[in-house]
Image (cartoon, grey):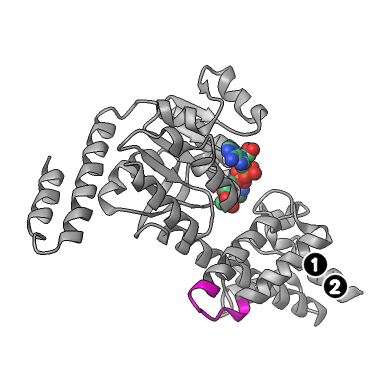
Amino acid sequence: MMAAARILRGAASSLLCRSRQRRDAAAAAAFAGVCSRTMASKTPVGFIGLGNMGNPMAKNLVKHGYPVIAYDVFPEACKEFQDVGEQVMASPADVAERADRIITMLPSSLNAIEAYTGPTGILKKVKKGSLLIDSSTIDPAVSKELAKEAEKMGAVFMDAPVSGGVGAARAGNLTFMVGGAEQEFAAAKELLGCMGSNVVFCGAVGTGQAAKICNNMLLAIGMIGTAEAMNLGIRLGLDPKLLAKILNMSSGRCWSSDTYNPVPGVMEGVPSGNNYQGGFGSTLMAKDLGLAQDSATNTKSPVPLGSLAHQIYRLMCAKGYSQKDFSSVFQFLREEESL
Ligand code: NAD
């Protein structure tokens, strides 16, 4: 009630600007939708895209007492949910007809466009006031477009991509980077908090994606740099564990050197110690770097190292590393050098 009154006060103070008035009225209407959603907080939540990440995320919602109404283009992906009594629908539109809060976790921008605006997409049957949260990693420009389309139908769209892989999705300690109308953040957090330990508001719609792709571009550059430095040091006769120790007490230290070292045998419990199985696949890294390139082009931002990192990961995918963890760039460099 207090928050609703704040919004009304905001609308009253903007009488001089007609367009601003319209925006505030739309926000107030959407907020009224949020109030009814929040009051019925354990009503079913739609979940679309039950793959490596979506499956454990949806299970965590169930664990927190939210019935899930599920859909995936791949029927086998829904079977587990059907077996434990959750509802499975025949299309995203059917999910939207039954749930006023929906989370999507899809591979790419194209899949998200299809799931939201396709012939049987969410927006075909979305209820007014519905909250639509897309946790896929996609182009921020696409998130903004989907938000506009959702608004036309009286629904609210937020982008909330995640950091953390399948392990974090299972453990429920993902980080969500959320973009959208700030007054909707509390409603989004109620659900995202069941699947993650950090839920961070980033700003307007698309800024969650922006934070995600900037982080992953830096991560890729850091990982390639770490792999290069480790490889050079080993070729110069240094013991890899000793070199890692020195880097980690020096200015070259970074997450890839001290937490996720790419050299087999340097650390326990990381993909480099397990033939680069598990973790974050090179193909996903190549995808995120491609999104960073598109965004850099759109905003005329120079990203020379990001471009090079993108090409390196694309080359790795072409040479059989696509399913290996992205730290396998170390192995890739070793093999390239040995030619
Ligand atoms: P995935 O391929 O395992 O799962 C995606 C699921 O979406 C599949 O089950 C697929 O059948 C389904 N799908 C595709 N198009 C659909 C549509 N139109 N309607 C309904 N379902 C559809 O992918 P994932 O690893 O779960 O990743 C999902 C998203 O999370 C991606 O955007 C990825 O970049 C991001 N992400 C992944 C990781 C990771 O470690 N896997 C980490 C962080 C972020």
In the image, is 48 to the left or to the right of 79? left
| Amino acid under disc 1 | Phe
Q: Does mark 2's beta carbon lie closer than 8 Å to ligand 1?
A: no
- Residue 316 relative to residue 44: left or right: right
Q: Three-letter amino acid code at disc 2?
A: Glu
* Residue depicted at x 14% and y 44%: 4
Would residue 165 be seen by someone viewing this image from the given angle? no
Give neighbour class at mark 2: few <14, some 14-19, many 20+ (Cα, 10 Å): few
The percent position of residue 124, horizontal first and vertical second, equals 45, 35
Please say whether residue 298 is one of the residues in the magenta stretch.
yes
Distance from disc 1 to disc 2, alpha carbons, whole Å, reads 6 Å
What secondary structure is marked by label 2? helix
Measuring from the top left, give residue 156's x and y in whole percent.
34, 45
Region of the chain picked out in magenta, as a range: 296-305
- Quadrant (top left, top right, bottom left, bottom right) of the C terminus: bottom right
Label 1 near ligand 1 (CB < 8 Å): no
Q: Does 254 appear in magenta?
A: no
Residue, disc 1: 332
**Residue drawn 50% across the image and 43% down it:** 117
Q: From the top left corner, tell me how far across and down residue 232 is, in percent.
A: 76, 80
SS of the residue under disc 1: helix
Q: Quadrant of the N terminus?
A: top left
State the image quarter where residue 167 is shown. top right
Image x and y of residue 34, in percent? 26, 38
Q: Are marks 1 and 2 in contact (CB under 8 Å)?
A: yes
The numbered mark at residue 336 is 2
